[in-house]
Image (cartoon, helix red, strand yellow):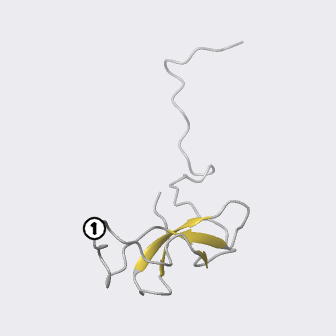
Amino acid sequence: MKLPRVECPKCSRPTAVAPMAGSLTKGRLWRHDDPGARRDPDGSLVSCSESLSTVELPGSGGQMEFDTDVPDPDTAPEPDPQGTIALF
């Protein structure tokens, strides 16, 4: 699944945002590193303070669209009856 990206309000990085349960218009920013403070003095990575914060989803409220190649039933070819068995 490809998640939409929004700009982090603090570090301005494009960050993936996951939908929140119970809300169609809000999501949580994925955990990401702050470009200015990469590591603590002990060497561990430091996440941006806005990681996991709640933000508005881009394009929220719209209907999802699926790209399907479904042929038009009026122009679809008839199925080949050869090799089929009647059920009843």
SS for dot 1: loop
Residue 88, can we see it?
yes
Q: What residue is shown at x 67% (from left), y 68% (from top)?
A: 63
Q: Quadrant of the C terminus?
A: top right
Is disc 1 surrounded by few (<14), some (14 to 19) or many (20+) residues within 10 Å? Answer: few
27 lies above or below 59: above
Q: What residue is shown at x 53% (from left), y 42% (from top)?
A: 77
Q: Position of residue 36 (x, y in %)?
A: 32, 85
Looking at the picture, which amino acid does disc 1 mark?
Answer: Asp
**Number of marks in the rendered image:** 1
| Residue that mark 1 sits on | 42
Residue 56, can we see it?
no
Q: Farthest residue in the front direction? A: 42
Q: What residue is shown at x 67% (from left), y 14% (from top)?
A: 87
In the foreground, 66 or 15 = 15
Q: Position of residue 4 (x, y in %)?
A: 50, 71
Q: Position of residue 47 (x, y in %)?
A: 40, 72
Q: Position of residue 65 (x, y in %)?
A: 59, 64
In the foreground, 69 or 22 = 22
75 lies above or below 28: above
Q: Is residue 25 left or right of residue 16?
A: right
